[in-house]
Each structure stands twice: as structure tokens, then as C-alpha cells.
Image (spheres, rainbow, N blue to C red):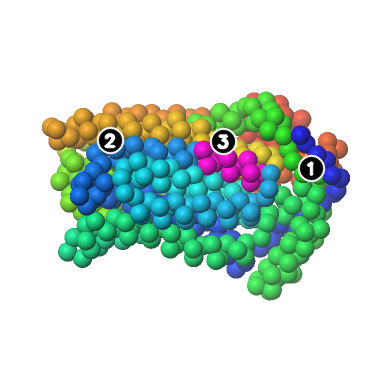
Amino acid sequence: MTVETGRITTDIPARMDRLPWARWHWMIVVGLGAVWILDGLEVTIVGSMSEALKPGDTGLGLSSSDIGMAGAVYVAGACLGALVFGQLTDRFGRKKLFLITLGVYTVATVLTAFSMNPLWYFGARFLTGAGIGGEYAAINSAIDELIPAKYRGRVDVAINGSFWVGATAGSLLTIPLLDPTLVDEAWGWRFAFGLGAILAVGILIVRRHVPESPRWLFIHGREDEAEKIVQDVERTVAQETGKELGSVSDTITIRQRQTVSLVLIAKTVFTLYPKRTILCFSLFVGQAFLYNAFFFTYGDSLSTFLDVKQTGYYIAVFAISNFLGALVLSTLFDTVGRVRMIAGTYILSGILLAGTGFFLGEVTAVTLTLLGCIIFFFASAGASAAYLTASEVFPMETRALCIAFFYAIGTAVGGISGPLYFGKLIDDASASKDITGIAIGYFVGAALMIAGGIVAAFLGVHAEGKSLESLAQPLTAEDDAPSGGAGATTAADAANPTGTTTGTGGGR
């Protein structure tokens, strides 16, 4: 049931969007964005230690298919966690949930380190994924609502790309931990998982100082609290930058509600924004299959087919190229534009991946890694932009759940099937040591990425520099919102057949 609590007119969105960049924003980036470092650490540790988990005496007796199964279980947990915690994030607030989900992750990672058998390991990986999935929904919505519109694209893409900072750290840290001359083989992989819990505690300390989203507060009848937070932020930013903040004229009128029903949310996503729904689904499926299939099993491919004993160095180089791609290209999503950059990165990375599949029989560990670096330099920026798209093109009341929904559905299709499919391909080809046996997986991933890019070219939303409220009017906004204000929508936008935006309104 939806409970209305009042009606207010506020300028908070415009005030948050007009802020210049300051140290306060860096605190938001560090406190919230570090979740991707954790995810990268988790995924890379599993990929780097695939061989360490296979022995029955020092590991857990896992096969290559089991390694793929562990990846699929982790992703399944992330999907469920995203849906459960995403709904709670829209209902109870961003801050409360991004503290809870980090706690779930921390406990589950410790449980993983103490795994006694494959079943325990799978269960712990499921819970770890649930915490990370919940983080995606809570964090992406909070970041977009706290970062000014001018910087939202580059910040979101770069933060999502920081996954590869964790991946680099994880791959390098596992090198000494998996060296039997330095650490006992039965304990090295356990210590590796424990690193994630240590990092999570540090993030929790910083995150305690991140405020609740003022946008969420004023919609849920807590406008006094929202006003106090914005005033504190404005005072802090003015002191840090030495700049006097200008006044704003844009306002939005809101019918405050304590809750918004799931029926209304579902109607919004599927009825009001069907083209945006297709867009987000396509982007998430493509990047989820590509990354989860390739990266979850990359270490296993190197050791199985190319006789690499220590995969950490190769994975570190691969991860660095991914982070550099997201970092270097991130600014272009605000300047060149969302549609061109998303379509371009998806299609180009798909074409390069397909080309690599044709030459798999001739690769070495070095050349395969080099090709992977080139492909994923572009793919990482595109994949990061999928999360950006889902977080900015739907109404505020549905933002966290929409992120969770598309992450869960897209990842369930691509992220669960990918590791299972690649794990099976590796198992089948391992007897003959013929790496060309996994080429079909490359072709499938390439096709999905190219398809996602084509969809983005036709249905993408030109969101660069626009306020969240102008891209998708809040469900609680009054229909007679001031002309030109944050909630205004024009008839031209409603009739726009491409799903792109014109002026200040939201295309559908």
C-alpha cells in the first residue's frame, strides 16, 4: 500500500546538482565506490586460486566444473541479494542498507575462509554474492543522488571500473599466498579470502560518515532532515572550494509517501519505460556473460591449456587494462555522450572478442593476455555504463530496485550461464589440451556485446549533464510541476520513438 504524508515544493535536487567538485565528493567516492574493489578482489581471488582449490588434501577437491559452479553460485547469490536489498533500499533508505549489505559481505567472506568442504564453500560464496548484489543496488542509487549532474557519468563509470583495482590487488596478493615456499598450501587460499573482510572493515569506517540521500528523505516525509543535510553539504563544499554558491530557481513539487507499492514500480518499469527496460536488459546480459564467463575462468584457461603455474601476474596485467579503460574513457561519457560511448564500446569490444576467438589456436599466455587487455579496455567502460544507465533513467522511488532488477535478470541470464558454460567447455577440451574448444564461448559473448551495442545506438538515453528528475519524473511529482523545473516533461519527449531525451523531459 502507498501512504501519502504531505505535499512539498523543494529545490534540493537543483542545489545538489549545482555544487562544484570538492573534497566532500571524494569522501562519497571512497566511502561508497570501494564496493567494486571488494567485488574485484572476490572474483579475482577465485580465478587466481582455481588450482589451489582442486587438491583434496590442501584444497577442497574442486574440479573445473566445480570452479565454474562456484562462480555461478556467487552470481546467483548476487542476483537474489540485489532484488531483496534493492527493494529494502527504496523502502528504508540508502544509508541503512549500504551498511547492512557491507556487514553481510564481511561475515560471508570470513565464512568462506573457514570452508571445510565444497558444500560449505558454495554456501559461503552464495552469501558473499548476496552482500555484493545488495551493495550494487544501494550504492549506485546513493552515488547518483549525491553526485552533481555535470560529473555523474564520469564518476559512475570510473567507480564501477574500480572493480579492477580490487582485481589487480587480488591477483598480486594471491601470488605470495599461493607460493608453497612462503605459505602452507592448506592456508594460503584461506588467507586470501580473509583479505576481503579486512578491507570491508576499513570501508565501513569511512562509510559511516556518508549521509542519507536528501532526495530519498524529502520524498519520504523527512524534508527537515533533508534540508539540514543539504545545508551542511553546501557549507562544507563552500569552505573546501572557497567559492560562493549561486542560487537556484528550479523546483519540484512532490506528494510525499512513506512507501511506494511494488505494483506501481512494476507498472513504471514495464509500461511507462518499455524501451529503457529493453535497453538495460540488453546491456546487462551482454556485459554479464562476457565478464563472468571470461574472467571467472580465465585463470583456469591459462593453467589448463597454456601450462601457466602462477596466473596472478597475467590476471593483474589484464585487470590494470580494464581499470585504465574505465578511467581514461569515463570523461567521454559526459562530453561525447552516453549513447555514442556505450554503443561504441560494446560493439568494438564484441568485434575484437570475436576476432580473438578465430585465432585461439595460435595464442600463448602472453598474447592471450595482451588481446584480453585490448578488448576489455573498451569493454570495461561499456560494462560500467550499464550500471550508470539503469541508475539514472528511471524514477527516484524505483531507482535501487531497478538497478537490482536489471542486474539480477541480466546477470542471471549471462552471469550464471557464462561460468557454467565456460567451465564445461574447459572440462571437455582439457583432455586434448586444445584451447580452440572454448572459442564458441568467445563467439557467444561477442554476439551478446554487439547486440547490446546496437540496442544502445537505437534506444540509448542522452543523459549527460541532465538532472535525474528531468530524465525520469519522480512518481510522487505533481503533474503541474513548474514549467522548466526538475520534474517537467514535454509532449515531444513522450512522443520520442527512440527513447532518447529532448530538452529537460524524459524520453520513453
Asked where in the image residue 300 lies, by quadrant, the reply is top left
Residues at marks 3 and 1, CA–CA distance in whole angstroms: 22 Å
Which residue in the protein does label 1 denote?
257
Residue at horizontal 64 percent and vertical 44 percent from the top:
88
- Apparent side of residue 402 relative to residue 248 in the rendered image (left or right): left
The percent position of residue 273, horizontal first and vertical second, equals: 65, 30
Residue at horizontal 38 percent and vertical 28 percent from the top:
447
SS class of the residue under badge 1? strand
SS class of the residue under badge 2? helix
The boundaries of the magenta stretch are: 80-90
Residue 20 appears in the picture as rendered? yes
Q: Which mark is residue 65?
A: 2
Type of the residue with mark 1: Arg
The residue closer to the viewer here, 230 or 176, is 176
Type of the residue with mark 2: Ser
Does 270 sit above or below residue 238?
Answer: above
Q: Earlier in the sequence, mark 1 or mark 2?
A: 2
The crowding category of the residue bearing disc 1, from other C-alpha atoms within 10 Å (few below 14, some 14 to 19, many at least 20), is: some
Does 162 sit above or below residue 456?
Answer: below
Give the quarter of the figure containing the C terminus.
top right
Type of the residue with mark 3: Phe
Which residue in the protein does label 3 denote?
405
SS class of the residue under badge 3? helix
Residue 502 appears in the picture as rendered? no
- Apparent side of residue 265 relative to residue 71 in the rendered image (left or right): right
Taking the magenta stretch, the answer to whether it contains residue 483 is no
The residue closer to the viewer here, 15 or 165, is 165
Does 337 sit above or below residue 99?
Answer: above
The percent position of residue 22, horizontal first and vertical second, equals: 62, 66
Does 27 sit above or below residue 214?
Answer: below
Give the quarter of the figure containing the N terminus.
top right
Q: Earlier in the sequence, mark 2 or mark 3?
A: 2
